[in-house]
Image (cartoon, rainbow, N blue to C red):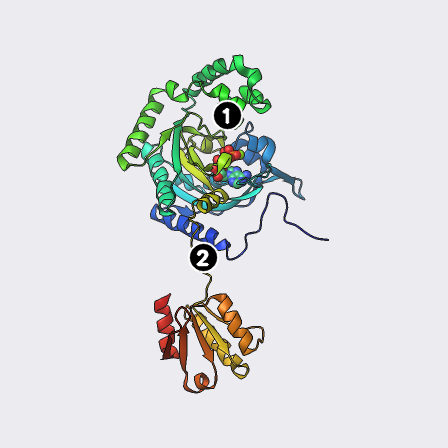
Amino acid sequence: MNYTAPRGTKDVLPPASQAWQKVEMKFRELCKRFSYGEIRTPTFEQTELFARGVGDATDVVQKEMYNFEDKGGRAMTLRPEGTAGVVRAYLEHGLSSLPSPQKFFYIISAFRYEKMQKGRYREFEQMGCECFGSGEPSADAEIISLLWIFFSELGMADISLQLNSIGCPNCRPAYLDQLRGYLRPHLDELCEDCQKRFETNPMRILDCKQESCQAVTKEAPSPLDTLCPDCQAHWDELLRLLDYYEIPYRINKRIVRGLDYYTRTVFEFISENVGSQGTICGGGRYDGLVDELGGQPTPAVGFALGVERLLLELEAQDLLPQLDHQPDIFIASFPSYQDQASAFAYRLRAAGIHAESDILGRSFKAQMKHANRTQARYLMVFGEEEAARMIGKVKRMSDGEELEMSFDELVQFLLQQV
Ligand code: ATP
Ligand code: MG
C-alpha cells in the first residue's frame, strides 16, 4: 500500500522548512519586543468551547470543524483557531486576576475541513496574539503596529491594512435592522449560504466571496454610519493614533470577520497578489468573548495570521528568507583517519560550528565530491600531517585560498566567520 498525506495537509521538507523557522523566529522575537509571552494550549478541546467561542452561526462551526468522540464518549474538536483555547486557559488559570494587560502569543496548527485551494488547507499554521484587559484604542493600535513592523521587517510591499468598526451590542442591532432592510428585496440574488446568513449572521454577507453577493452588497449601509457615541469615539481615536504613528490604512466596510465575538475594531492585512486567498491576517477586538466563555466581562483584542499565505506572498514577492544550509566546514579524511576526522567534527560542533564529515565510509574521492555538493564554505582534509601536528590546512572554497592554523585557532576562526 502506498500512503499519501491526507488531503489538505502537506509535508514541509528541509531546507524549505527554514523559511518557516525564520518567519516563526522573527514573530517570536517581535512578540518579545512587545511583551507578549508564548502560550501553548491543547490541539483539541471540548467541541462546546468552539461552538460558543467561535459562534454557532459561523461557517467554521457549522461546516469546517474536525469533530470526534473520544473513547470516553466526550465530544472533542481539533482546534479550528487559537483564540477560544487561549481564553479558556486564561480563565482556567485565573489569569484575569493578575494585573492587566495580559498579553499572549501562539504558533499553532489549526484544522478546518475546507475545500483545498492555493492558500487554503485543512491543517494550516496560525501565529497569533491576544491582549486581555484593555478596552483602549491604544491597545488596538499597539497590536496593529506589531503587525505593521512584522510585515515591514519581512520587506513586504503590496500589503494593505484594511479596517472597519462593527460597533457593539448597543449599536449593532440597529445596524443589523438597517442591513436586513437593505438586503431583503435582494434575497433571491444572494447565494444559498447568504440566504441563511440573512437570519443568523447578516453582517457576514458583506464578506461573502461570491461575485453575485458582492454586487448586492456594494451599496449596502456601513456599520460606521450607525456607531453609538462610545464606539464612534473609539474608532476616531484609533484612526488618530494610526495617523500619528504614520501607519497607512484603508477603511473597508466589507471587513466584518467571520467570527461572532468581534466588537468594534476589525482589521485584515490583505495582499494584492494571493488572489481570493489574499487575507493573510485577520483580527480585531472581542470584548464579548471572555464573558461568553464564563469569565467577567473583559475587553480583549487580537489577531491570527496564516503562515502558508504569508509564505506564498513572500514567495510571490521574491522575499523568501535566504536558506543557510551550507556547512561552515567539511572535514574530509583518508580512510585510516576517519575516527580522528569525525571526532574533530564533533568538537567543532560542540564549539558551535556547523561541521560535516563522512558517515558512510566513503572513499576520499567520494567524500570530496560530497563536500562540493554540500557547498561547505571551508574544506579540511584530515590526514597523517593533521593527526600528527594538530595543525590543519583549511581551504576556502569560494576562491581556493588555503590557510594553515592550529585546531584551536581554526575554532576561533570559524566562529568569527559564522
Ligand atoms: P477566509 O475568509 O480566507 O476563509 P477566515 O476568516 O476563515 O479566512 P480567520 O479565521 O480569521 O480566517 O483566520 C486567520 C487567518 O488564518 C486567515 O487570514 C488566513 O490567513 C488563515 N487561514 C484561515 N483559514 C485557512 C486555511 N484553511 N488554510 C490556510 N490558512 C487559513
Ligand atoms: Mg474561512
**Depth check, front residue: 105 or 252:** 252
Residue 223: image location, x then y, percent: 41, 21
Identify the secondary structure beneath mark 2.
loop
Instruction: Tell whether circle 1 marks a residue whose Cβ is less than 8 angstroms from ligand 1.
Output: no
> What residue appears at the point 54 percent right and 76 percent down from the top-left corner?
365
Quadrant assignment, res 163:
top left
Q: Nearer the viewer, residue 113 or 68?
A: 113
Give the crowd class for mark 1: few <14, some 14-19, many >=20 residues within 10 Å: many
Query: Which residue in the structure is indicated by mark 2?
Result: 323
Residue identifier under label 1: 204
Q: Nearer the viewer, residue 127 or 91?
A: 127
Q: Position of residue 224 (x, y in %)?
A: 38, 22
- Residue 369, percent across and down? 52, 71
Can the viewer see residue 80 in this picture?
no
Residue 366 marker:
none
Check if mark 2's residue and mark 1's residue have beta carbons within 8 Å.
no
Does the rendering let one see residue 22? Answer: yes
Residue drawn at x 34%, y 48% is: 33
In the structure shown, which secondary structural element does the residue marked by tag 1 occupy? Answer: helix
In the rendered image of this protein, does residue 3 appear above or below residue 266? below
Q: Amino acid at mark 2?
A: Leu
Query: Which amino acid lies under the numbered mark 1 shown in the image of this protein?
Result: Arg
For the image, the number of numbered tags is 2
Mark earlier in primary sequence (2, 1): 1
Q: Residue furthest right?
A: 1
- The correct choice, above or below, for 370 with respect to 157 in the image is below
- The alpha-carbon separation of the residues under discs 2 and 1 comes to 41 Å
Q: Residue at x 47, y 17 (%)?
A: 179
Where is residue 87 drawn, in percent x and y? 47, 38
Q: Nearer the viewer, mark 2 or mark 1?
A: 2
Q: Residue at x 28, y 30 (%)?
A: 240
